[in-house]
Structures are given as C-alpha cells and as structure tokens.
C-alpha cells in the first residue's frame, strides 16, 4: 500500500504539471484523486464495493443467519389435542359447526385456495396478475413521444506553415459550439401502420469570423407514414397479442374457479369424513364398554363355577383388541379434524374440537344423465380452459402465418426544411415557411430466402393446434367417464346405505340373541366367541352404515363438482376487488383503480343444522342394556363404564345371574321391518 501511495503521488504530480493545473484546481484534483484511490484500493467493505474499479473476487461463501431473514413468524397456537391428551391445559373451547358455516369459513380464508392435503397453488390474485398483460399488449399501440437534446463543443487542432517563416509550423484550430434537438411523436395503428411527426434543429456557432451565418440554425419538420403490406400488416395480426392476453386472463379466472370448486368439494368431503369418523369412534367405544361388561360377567361366572377360563381369556383378549381399535378411531377423528381445519384455513388446534351439527341427507337424488352431460359440457372449468387454449392457438396461428410472409412496406415522407442565422452585419437572415420541401415515396422489400424459421414456426403452431384439439376431445371423453363413475357411485352408495341399515338391524338382533344365549348358559351355542363375533359385526355395521351415507353425501358434491356447478349450487359468486395504483399521468397525479383480486363471496344456506352432533342422526343407542339388582329386588338398567379395569371388579354375591327374558318373535319381526 505504501508503494502504491508513493507511485500514485508521483503520477499525480506529473499529470498536474503536464496539464498546467495550478492553485485551487490542483488542490481539488489532488483530493479527488486520492479519494478515488482510497475507494478503489482501500480495505474490503461491502458498502463500498460498487465504487471499486475492479471488484474483488469471491473467495469465500457468505451465508447469512436464517434468524436475520425477514418474514412473519408463527402466531400463538394452543397445544394440539392427541389421543393421550385430548384436552390440553391451553385448549380452546369446542365449536359446533354446520356444513354451511364450514364452507363460509373456507371461502373467507381463501386468499390462498386450499384443497384437502395442502394448497392448490392458486390464489385469488392470479386473474388480476394475468389481466395486466392486456395493457402490456395494448402498450405497443400507445403514442410514443421522443425528445433528444445534446450540446457539443468541437475544437480539433490542425497544423499549417507560418506565413512569416515558412520553416516554422503553426498549430491552431477552429472551435464550434453545437446544440442538436429532436422532438418527435409516433403512433402505431391497428393495421400495423406507423405515423410519425417530428421537428429538429441544429444551431451551430463558430468562434472565428468569415462564415456567412454565425450562428447558423438549420431546422426541419417531417411527417412520415410506413404501412406494412404483407408481414406486420392487417388488423387480425396486430390485435392478436391483445386477444391472447384476454384469453389468458379468462384461463386464469377459470383455473382459479376450478380450484375454488375443488376447495368447496374438499370442505364437504372433509366434513362428512369427520362425521363418519365420529360415528365409528362411537361404535368402537360401545364395543369397549360392552366387552368390559362381558369380561366382568365372565369373571363373575368363573368365580361362581358357571364358566371356564377360556371365556375369560377370550373376553380379555377381545377387550384389548377393541381398546387398540378405539385408539385408532380416536386418532382418525383427530386426523379428520386436522384436515378440515387445514382446508378451512384455521390453526391446527383452534377450535380444540370440531363438532359437526349438519345431519347427512338420506333422500335419494334422481339425476337425469343427459342433463348432467349437457351442463358439464358448458360449465366444467377444465373443459372451458381447453376451449380457451384452442382460441389462443388460433390467434397464435394468425401471427405465425403473418410472420411467414415477405416484408413489404409502403413508405411516405414529407419534410419542410428551414435555415436561419446572423449575417456579418449582425442582421437576421431566414427562409420563408414552406420555401424548401422534400418528399419521399417508396416500397421496401425484404425476405429471408427459404423462410426456414418462419415456416418452421408456422408448422409448429399448426401441430400445436391439432394437439390441443385432441386434448379437448380427450377432456370431453375423460369428463364423460368421470360423470359416469359419479352416477354409478350415487346409486351404489345409497343402495349400500340401505343395505347396511338392514345389516345393522340384523346384527343388533343377532347380538341380542347371542347375548341372551350366552347369559343363559344353556345349549351348545352358549360360548363367548359367538358374542364376540356379534359385537364385532354390530360395530362394523354401524360404522359401515355411516361410511355409506356420508360417502353418498360426498358423492353428491362430487357430481356437482364434475358437472362444474358446485359453486352455483351453493350460491357462491365472485366479487372483483380493486386497488389504487399509479395512473397514466404518473405519481404527480391521483392514482387510478385497477383489479386486485376475485374474492369468492359467502355461500347461501343449503344444509340443515341441529343442536346435536351430526352422528346422532344414525340413532346411536347402546347395543344391549345391562341389568343390575336393585335394593327392592327389581332390576334396573346399568350404563356401561369403560373407565374401570377388570382387575377392580369384586363379586359381592356369588349367585347365578338370572337369564334374560327371551325376545318374542313378533317383536323381532317389528325390529326387522323397522330396519328395512
């Protein structure tokens, strides 16, 4: 650094002496020189790096601490419930939620459109973002104002012989001061024609005498028009970029609408999945409570000598299995609640528990197959997008066809020239208006021999059009199969629901009979395995009935989704929100309003609600009432308790339990009819 300082100081001294710098100018130049040298060769500093003449090499990696990065943090979220701790200390209250309310919450939190399992990748801002490209395409037709102003000082040295001494040479020069200005306005029309109007002036002043005009000011005004006749000409080819931008905006809107439709369908599916999971949880709880009671009963029979260790071991094993299944059912409910919270845009543990209160529909929906096809062909957003892609391809094909033409331009120009200046007698001399004019007419032609690139682009666009037309046909084909699958599923799930209703009634009857036979201890069928199979079949029947009915209600939403009318069916409309941004006149004037987003509005009420949990619509009752001896000798119903372990049971009266009363055949027939 010392060597550079000494060398730099010597160079500056020689430069100042050569240029004749003295006094103040030499001191100022000295300060500027050393300041620049300090910035260029000083110690490393990131803030000074752009000012260096030669930027330093990056010889190490600079990784910032992630804690220094800007961005939001997680808000305060209560502890999520688990199967081990379903009610944490900081848990929020539970929330009764109807399906209409769930859809409304999801729509209100749809700034980023969510689907089951995560995000759709779409936002409500996407159409407005794409809409800006329309103005970008229109910008090529905006008038263009251009103004150039330049000042010049010309003084070049020249040699000549000294008239007084021919052996000597004199070096001198003539200095001129120039000012050049050009102001023009050009406008491109929808036919491709470009009209321009411009004015120029070039004042020039000489620092010696002997010129006729000093200063001399030539000027001109010109009007020109260029009209492409083949390539670049025509209305369709010039407005095609605007049409493509409009089509892209429509595509973006229907892509967003498709994502909103999937979100609404996902909310409905998640809601009914939660109802089915809660019903299954209730069935597993009843199985645990019943087998707990059965284990007590088997142990009591063993102590009184009316049973064996095999029944007790079987009851204990089945209780352990049912408790494991109960844990799985509880976990399933938590997973279904978490999925519903996620798609609704709620925190993981707010509310702590979601209680659905909209009962599922049990009415069969009559669907007209031709009507479904007609509606889907018009309303499905994915088919609409494929149709818009075809329209955009047609516009691009117009562009490619135009680009494959030769370049032939008709040009016309008319110019008014003028001159003004000061004569040696200090008077002003100038031309009259329109005294000197010029004009130009012509046709310019150019074409790449073979047009290889243009023809290849045209072939590419023709093939893309064929491909996208095939994609549309495949989309229609695939949509028809999806609608057919939904149509079949509707019938399947509803018939399964009715069948599982009968299965549940039959399994209830079987459980009553097997329980009565086992408790009587009479006959070859008085074994616990039959009771275990009966309670297992009953629980599965209850769960299957709920699964079938909730699947049927979900399939109703799937059919509306595949037909493209799920938003209209729920009364959901989009509202364009606007925001202020810089207008055509710039920041010095008021901002203008532009589209910001398409916010889906609230849904109309459609689904019923009640004061009870939705799973109670399945008539959830204890499968078999248990009896206990009262103080007066009469029997009363004992509710099962699943919180007591078998080791805590104590038999106080070792007597044989009385067999239950047999179920009359007439009552069994009435139960069977009610199940149907």
Image (cartoon, grey):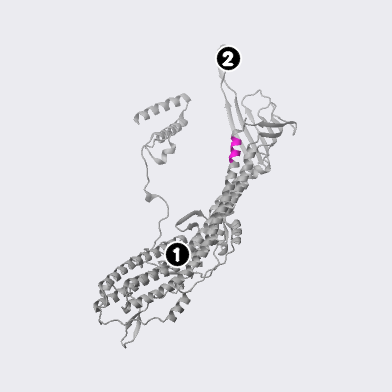
| Pick the front one: 575 or 392 | 392
Q: Image check: 32 left or right of 201? A: left
Q: Residue 58 lies in magenta, yes or no?
A: no
Residue at the spot x=28%, y=75% of the render?
298
Give the mark nearer the N terminus: 1 vs 2: 2
- The spot of residue 470 in percent (x, y) is 58, 47
Q: Image check: 164 left or right of 549? A: right
Q: Image check: 335 left or right of 304? A: right
Residue at the spot x=31%, y=69% of the render?
319
Q: Is residue 279 visible?
A: no
Q: Is residue 259 visible?
A: yes
Pointer 1: what residue?
A: 273
- The spot of residue 35 in percent (x, y) is 42, 35
| Pick the front one: 562 or 504 | 504
| Image quadrant in which the N terminus is located | top left
Element on which disc 2 rests: strand
Residue at the spot x=50%, y=57% of the render?
113
- Give the quadrant of residue 225: top right
Pointer 2: what residue?
A: 162
Q: CA distance from mark 1 to mark 2?
A: 108 Å
- Tell me where the magenta segment starts and ends, as one range: 453-460
Q: Is residue 624 above or below residue 6?
A: below
Q: Is residue 249 above or below residue 501?
A: above
Q: Residue 457 lies in magenta, yes or no?
A: yes
């Amino acid at each position: 650094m010392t060597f550079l300082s000494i060398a730099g100081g010597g160079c500056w001294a020689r430069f100042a002496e050569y240029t004749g710098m003295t006094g103040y100018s030499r001191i100022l130049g000295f300060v500027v020189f050393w300041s620049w040298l300090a910035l260029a060769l000083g110690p490393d500093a990131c803030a000074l790096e752009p000012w260096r003449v030669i930027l330093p090499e990056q010889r190490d990696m600079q990784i910032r601490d992630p804690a220094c990065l800007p961005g939001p943090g997680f808000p305060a979220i209560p502890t999520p419930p688990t199967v081990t701790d379903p009610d944490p200390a900081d848990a929020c209250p539970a929330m009764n939620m109807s399906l209409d309310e769930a859809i409304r919450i999801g729509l209100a939190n749809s700034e980023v459109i969510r689907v089951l399992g995560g995000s759709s990748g779409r936002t409500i801002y996407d159409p407005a973002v794409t809409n800006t490209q329309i103005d970008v395409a229109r910008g090529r037709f905006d008038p263009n104002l251009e103004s150039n102003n330049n000042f010049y000082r010309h003084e070049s040295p020249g040699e000549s012989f000294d008239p007084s001494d021919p052996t000597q040479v004199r070096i001198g020069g003539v200095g001129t001061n120039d000012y050049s200005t050009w102001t023009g306005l050009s406008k491109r029309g929808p036919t491709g024609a470009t009209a321009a109007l411009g004015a120029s002036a070039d004042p020039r002043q000489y620092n010696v005498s002997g010129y006729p005009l000093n200063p001399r000011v030539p000027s001109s005004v010109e009007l020109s028009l260029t009209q492409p006749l083949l390539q670049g000409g025509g209305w369709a080819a010039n407005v095609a970029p605007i049409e493509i931008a409009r089509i892209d905006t429509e595509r973006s809107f229907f892509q967003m609408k498709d994502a909103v439709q999937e979100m609404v369908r996902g909310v409905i599916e998640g809601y009914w999945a939660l109802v089915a999971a809660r019903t299954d949880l209730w069935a597993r709880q009843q199985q645990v409570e019943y087998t707990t009671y059965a284990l007590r009963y088997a142990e009591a029979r063993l102590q009184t000598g009316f049973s064996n260790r095999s029944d007790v071991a079987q009851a204990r094993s089945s209780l352990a299995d049912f408790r494991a299944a109960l844990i799985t059912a509880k976990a399933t409910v938590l997973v279904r609640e978490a999925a519903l919270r996620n798609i609704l845009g709620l925190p993981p543990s707010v509310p702590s528990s979601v209680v659905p209160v909209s009962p599922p529909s049990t009415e069969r929906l009559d669907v007209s197959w031709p009507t479904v096809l007609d509606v889907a062909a018009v309303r499905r957003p994915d088919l609409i997008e494929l149709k818009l892609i075809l329209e955009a391809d047609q516009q691009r094909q117009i562009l490619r066809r135009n680009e494959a033409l030769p370049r032939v331009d008709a040009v016309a120009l008319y110019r008014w020239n003028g001159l003004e200046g000061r004569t040696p007698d200090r008077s002003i001399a100038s031309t009259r208006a329109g005294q000197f004019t010029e004009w130009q007419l012509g046709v310019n032609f150019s074409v790449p021999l073979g047009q290889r690139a243009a023809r290849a682009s045209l072939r590419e666009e023709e093939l893309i059009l064929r491909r996208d037309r095939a994609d549309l046909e495949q989309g229609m084909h695939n949509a028809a199969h999806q609608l057919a699958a939904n149509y079949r599923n509707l019938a399947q799930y509803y018939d399964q629901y009715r069948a599982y209703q009968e299965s549940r009634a039959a399994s209830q009857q079987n459980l009553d009979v097997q329980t009565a036979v086992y408790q009587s201890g009479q006959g070859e069928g008085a074994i616990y395995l039959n009771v275990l199979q009966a309670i297992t079949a009953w629980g599965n029947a209850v769960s299957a009935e709920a699964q079938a009915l909730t699947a049927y209600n979900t399939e109703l939403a799937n059919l509306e989704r595949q037909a493209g009318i799920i938003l209209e069916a729920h009364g959901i409309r989009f509202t364009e929100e606007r925001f202020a941004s810089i207008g055509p006149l710039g920041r010095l004037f008021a901002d203008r309003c532009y589209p910001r987003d398409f916010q889906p509005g609230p849904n109309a009420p459609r689904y019923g609600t009640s004061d009870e949990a939705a799973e109670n619509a399945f008539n959830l009752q204890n499968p078999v009432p248990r009896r206990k001896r009262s103080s007066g000798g009469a029997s009363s119903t004992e509710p099962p308790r699943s919180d007591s372990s078998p080791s805590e049971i104590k038999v106080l009266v070792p007597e044989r339990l009385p067999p239950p009363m047999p179920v009359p055949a007439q009552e069994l027939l009435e139960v069977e009819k009610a199940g149907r």
